[in-house]
């Protein structure tokens, strides 16, 4: 005999625990809201409904198989309301977290088609609910099925009102999120019915079985309840995306009541009622990222949705402005002029005490459309950023455009701070959503130096051949070596010399990295894994340089190894390795003092 509590202990709780364990590194406050809100609503609505149908003997339970009975329903049944809700929502989160919800909100969709998609299903669902209500007569064969329909159809109509088109656009993920939990719970139901844990009354059901020990009504119940939970998850995701893109940055100061009011407002809005620009600009920004760095586009999925959205905007701004500085088809004078325009735009954005009213049309003849779109999206981040770091990044572009040489290690540190520490600071401010911590910011800036030094070490030959640039301090190399590098012939230095120079940079990165990495532990818990993974991938590049025989033209980490590094970092799997390989490059060099935006931009 299988008790009801054993059904949970053997079949539902282990699966729920596994899902929570998989999702642990990605858990965010938005997920907490979904779990608490949806399981609470499920409990409050299902409890009276289930008591009603048990009272009318639609199903009953083995008295010796339950722990206690509250009202007409076993304690374990109340547990099922919460456990099932958490299981389905968690699985849906796992399936859907890899794509940004904002991608599926389309303010420019044709309004007539949208109205048909929105209101025809609502009318159908409400008609079914009314018909089911009239058929829900106790002690008749349609009672149980009709009760299920009048219970779920009005809820589905409401959810379709708030997220119908969004659900249609995500139909594949929605289908998987519904089918897998439904099949699993149907199987659990079959096991329990076969064991006599509970039984479905033939008097109040059709007697039709979808599979052995699986009545049609039970299958419909699992299917439709999962549809509700998946649709509700989609509705919350859509509402959050609208709030984030259209409601601005409000940080943690927003009360739960205010947040629920705003979510309800966003839920009720149709796509066509939304401003098009935020979504179009976001789409352009992510299009830039897909083309420029698919690695970042993919890896960003480890961050919470809102942070991922903002990091993508920040990264898109960096890429768009970097492209302005690096576009060889445009004369240097024109590029410098465009960077000046960007500086003016940044000054205008950050000079206003509140939201700046920028006349974007006045810049259209001076900057490419993609750059304008990325800048417009970037303007949303103004409340959480500091202008000094943005100007510092632009100084890095200017450094490259004017062809300045890196004469000393101080110049190397200055340049790396401009193009990498600035980005590290900006990323950290986005992640911390405006809650400034100077110690953490300093560690982020140090990590920027770590990644940039590693990047320069990897690309000595590549920078020579493609850019005709030398990012090594002149004091490290002879005049002849410098001329070889800037003329595109860095390979003529020989593997031994290139390796020595590269490992000198790696050694500098290692010294800084041991301290810089501590800042990751002060970041929000749901962001630590993603940042640690990005840093660890660059650390692995340093390892490859150390382990290589000679100097590879462009050291890289294999896809399999990179995947393992990300997995290890996200789940905080402890291994003997540290920031850099235990191999030490310091025997090659003496101990050192502590158009190229590449660190933080993983290729």
Image (tube, helix red, strand yellow):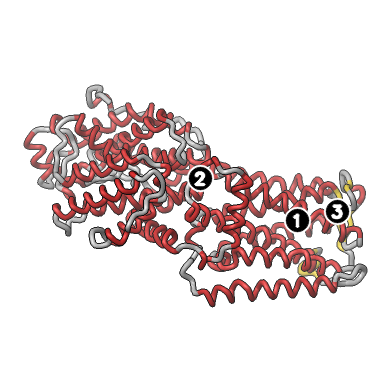
Q: From the viewer's perspective, tell me whether residue 249 is left or right of residue 281.
A: right
The residue that mark 3 highlights is 197
Q: From the viewer's perspective, tell me whether residue 505 is left or right of residue 218.
A: left
Residue 179 in the image: x percent, y percent? 65, 63
**Label for residue 479?**
none
Q: Quadrant of residue 447?
A: top left
Q: From the viewer's perspective, tell me whether residue 369 is left or right of residue 261.
A: left
Report crowding for label 3: few under 14, some 14 to 19, many 20 or more residues within 10 A (C-alpha).
many
Asked whether disc 2 touches disc 3, contact meaning CB atoms under 8 Å apart, the reply is no
Nearer mark to the viewer, of 2 and 3: 2
Measured Cα–Cα span from mark 3 to mark 1: 11 Å
**340 and 75: which one is in front?**
340
Q: At 46% from the left edge and 39% from the top edge, which residue is drawn?
A: 432
563 versus 523 height, above or below: below
Q: At 45% from the left edge and 39% from the top edge, which residue is drawn?
A: 434
Asked whether disc 1 touches disc 2, contact meaning CB atoms under 8 Å apart, the reply is no
Give the secondary structure at mark 3.
Answer: loop
The residue that mark 2 highlights is 250
Give the secondary structure at mark 1.
Answer: helix
Residue 264 in the image: x percent, y percent? 62, 56
Measured Cα–Cα span from mark 1 to mark 2: 44 Å
């Amino acid at each position: 005999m299988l008790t009801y509590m054993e059904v949970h202990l053997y079949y539902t709780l282990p699966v729920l625990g596994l899902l929570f364990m998989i999702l642990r590194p990605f858990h965010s406050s938005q997920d907490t809201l979904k779990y608490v809100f949806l399981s609470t609503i499920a409990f409050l609505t299902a409890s009276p409904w289930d008591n009603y149908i048990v009272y009318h003997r639609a199903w009953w339970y083995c008295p010796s198989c339950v722990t206690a009975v509250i009202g007409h329903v076993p304690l374990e049944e109340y547990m099922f309301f919460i456990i099932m809700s958490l299981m389905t929502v968690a699985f849906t989160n796992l399936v859907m977290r890899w794509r940004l919800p904002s991608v599926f909100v389309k303010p420019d969709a044709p309004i007539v088609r949208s109205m048909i998609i929105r209101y025809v299903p609502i009318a159908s669902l409400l008609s079914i609910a009314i018909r089911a209500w009239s058929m829900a007569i106790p002690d008749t064969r349609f009672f149980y099925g009709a009760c299920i329909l009048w219970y779920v159809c009005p809820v589905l109509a409401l959810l379709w009102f708030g997220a119908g088109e969004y659900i249609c656009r995500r139909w594949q993920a929605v289908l998987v999120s519904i089918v897998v939990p439904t099949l699993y719970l149907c199987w659990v139901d079959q096991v329990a019915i076969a064991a006599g844990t509970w039984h479905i009354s033939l008097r109040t059901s059709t007697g039709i079985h979808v599979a052995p020990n699986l009545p049609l009504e039970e299958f419909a119940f699992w299917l439709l309840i999962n549809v509700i939970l998946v649709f509700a998850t989609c509705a919350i995701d859509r509402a959050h995306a609208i709030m984030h893109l259209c409601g601005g940055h409000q940080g943690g100061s927003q009360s739960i009541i205010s947040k629920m009011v705003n979510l309800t407002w966003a839920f009720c809005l149709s796509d066509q009622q939304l401003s098009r620009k935020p979504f179009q600009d976001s789409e352009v920004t992510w299009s830039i990222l897909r083309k420029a760095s698919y690695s970042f586009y993919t890896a960003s999925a480890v961050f919470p949705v809102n942070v991922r959205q903002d990091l993508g905007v920040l990264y898109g701004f960096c890429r768009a402005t970097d492209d302005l500085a690096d576009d060889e088809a445009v004369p240097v004078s024109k590029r410098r002029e465009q960077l000046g325009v960007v500086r003016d735009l940044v000054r205008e954005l950050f000079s206003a005490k509140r939201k700046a009213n920028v006349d974007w049309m006045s810049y259209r003849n001076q900057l490419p459309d993609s750059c304008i779109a990325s800048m417009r999206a970037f303007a949303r981040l103004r409340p959480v950023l500091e202008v000094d770091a943005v100007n510092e990044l632009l100084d890095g572009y200017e450094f490259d455009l004017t062809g300045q040489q890196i004469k000393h290690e101080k110049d190397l540190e200055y340049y790396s701070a401009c193009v990498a520490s600035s980005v590290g600071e900006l990323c950290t401010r986005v992640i911390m959503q405006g809650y400034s911590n100077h110690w953490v910011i300093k560690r982020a800036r140090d990590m920027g130096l770590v990644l940039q030094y590693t990047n320069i070490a990897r690309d000595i030959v590549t920078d020579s051949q493609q850019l005709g640039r030398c990012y090594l301090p002149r004091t490290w190399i002879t005049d002849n070596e410098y001329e070889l590098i800037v003329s595109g012939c860095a390979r003529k230095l020989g593997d031994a010399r290139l390796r020595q120079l590269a490992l000198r940079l790696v050694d500098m990165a290692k010294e800084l990295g041991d301290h810089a990495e501590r800042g990751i532990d002060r970041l929000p818990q749901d962001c630590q894994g993603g940042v640690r993974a990005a840093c660890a991938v660059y650390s692995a590049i340093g390892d490859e340089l150390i382990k290589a025989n000679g100097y590879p033209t462009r050291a890289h980490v294999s896809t399999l190894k990179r995947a393992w590094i990300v997995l290890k970092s996200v789940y905080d799997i402890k291994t003997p390795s540290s920031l850099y390989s235990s191999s030490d490059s310091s025997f090659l060099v003496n101990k050192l003092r502590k158009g190229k935006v590449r660190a933080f931009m993983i290729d």
